Amino acid sequence: MTAAGSTFRWRSIALAAFLPTLLFSIGEGAIIPLIPVAAHNLGATLAIAGLIAAMVTLGELAGDIPSGAVVGRIGERASMIAAAGVAVAGLLLSIVAPNPLVLGIGIFLVGLATAVFALARHAFMTSYVPLEFRARSLSTLGGRSGWATSSGRSSARASSSSPDRCSRRSGSS
């Protein structure tokens, strides 16, 4: 083991990288099943609700290239904090959305924030984890992210109303 490897502690990246990833992924996973329901409740058709749900992915695609410039300019930690702020702003916009268009814009902002956050967390891991631990740490990061997204979706499904209640709420029984 090298000198860098002997001084590396998993706890040193747990709070800085694994915990924010866990929380961000749970939150993102929790909103995904609720997006079509929210769109429907705002009067969107099935096709428009699908388009609004796809805005997360479209936001990620649109944000992938510019996120490199953001992370390069302000750094990994600041980028993760800023991305979390943009995600919260997008969620707040989605919560108060008066129509499907505003909901789509809010969800698009969440996708943009996801792109920046994902790149920043990977850049952080490659910067702060010694080479001999990098593969294990990135694999742990990916596993926790996948688990967190899945558990967020499961908790959202468990806590959301049944489809019958949603249709009664929107007035289409």
Image (cartoon, helix red, strand yellow):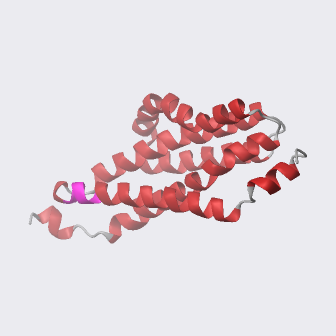
The correct choice, above or below, for 78 with respect to 49 in the image is below
Q: In this image, 46 relative to 1: left or right?
A: right
Q: Which residues, given as a range, are shown in magenta?
A: 133-137
Dominant SS in magenta: helix
The correct choice, above or below, for 15 with respect to 110 in the image is below
Of residue 72 and residue 67, the one placed in the foreground of this image is 67
The image quarter containing residue 43 is: top right
Q: Residue at x 26, y 57 (%)?
A: 129
The image quarter containing residue 59 is: top right
Question: Which residue reaches farthest right?
Answer: 171
Q: Is residue 51 magenta?
A: no
Q: Is residue 135 magenta?
A: yes
Q: Residue at x 84, y 38 (%)?
A: 98
Q: Residue at x 50, y 58 (%)?
A: 150
Quadrant of the image for the N terminus?
A: bottom left
Of residue 101 and residue 49, the one placed in the foreground of this image is 49
Query: Where residue 83 sits in the image (x, y, percent)?
Result: 54, 45
The correct choice, above or below, for 142 with respect to 113 in the image is below
Query: Where residue 172 sits in the image (x, y, percent)?
Result: 88, 44
